[in-house]
Amino acid sequence: MSYHDEQESLESVKAWWAKWGNATTWIVLIVLVIGAAYNGWNFWQRRHAAEASVLYEHLQEAVNGNDQALIGRVATDMEDKFSGTAYAQMTALTAAKAFYTAGNSAGAKTQLQWAIDHAKDPEYKQIAKLRLALVLLDEKNYDAGLKLLADEPLDSFKGVIADRRGDLLAAQGKRDDARAAYKLALDTIPQNDTSARQLIQFKLDALGG
């Protein structure tokens, strides 16, 4: 390349930079800031999840030791500090089961309602509804249990929801409605789930008709 050609190229670069230099600089800066923010967010998410994991381990230890007070404190900490993590919904169900087993239905109901209101995964919400309906059945609060299960369930839960509705309806003395619910459960629960199907058939037979 001749000296003249080099000068022309240099002048072209200068002209391009004069026109686009500031915009290019800003674009590069924005890309760098976005990249840093993304990396920072990922780091925070990983650290947040790791802290939630440690707290969940504490919950498991409290459950194994049947320390009801500690279970309550850990569950509250998890829900206050890590509500956006999967560990929070797991904690709510685990704590609810521990409370229910210990005869603390009020504590179980609180945890299950939290899962229904805040769980990120629809499956966890559905499990929480099923278990809360069981607590309400124990309390003979049948209308509240049926209201809780009134929404259209996920396909994979249609059978067990229908079964639980049958239990509530049977307890109310609504035998025809209970039979219909149990029949729906049998129609939707997989054939290979023999133990569940046998139990539902037993309840259906017990209703007569």
Image: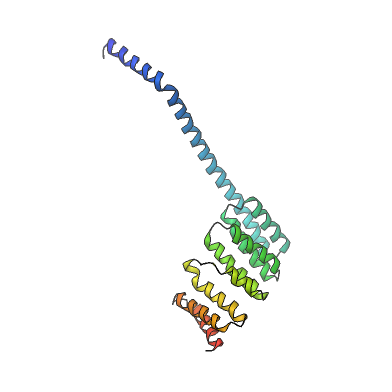
**Where 145 falls versus 9 (above or below)?**
below
**Which image quadrant is residue 71 in?**
bottom right
Q: Nearer the viewer, residue 39 or 184?
A: 184
Among all residues in the image, which is located at the extreme left?
Answer: 1
Q: Nearer the viewer, residue 155 or 150?
A: 150
Identified at 68% across, 67% down, the residue is: 99
Among all residues in the image, which is located at the extreme top?
Answer: 3
Instruction: Give residue 44's position: percent from left, percent from top.
Output: 57, 43
**Where 88 falls versus 135 (above or below)?**
above
Answer with left or right where residue 135 lies relative to residue 27. Answer: right
Colouring used for the render: rainbow
Q: Quadrant of the N terminus?
A: top left
**Where 95 falls versus 18 (above or below)?**
below
Among all residues in the image, which is located at the extreme bottom?
Answer: 209
Instruction: Give residue 104's position: percent from left, percent from top.
Output: 71, 68
Answer with left or right where residue 181 lies relative to residue 105. Answer: left
Identified at 59% across, 68% down, the residue is: 148
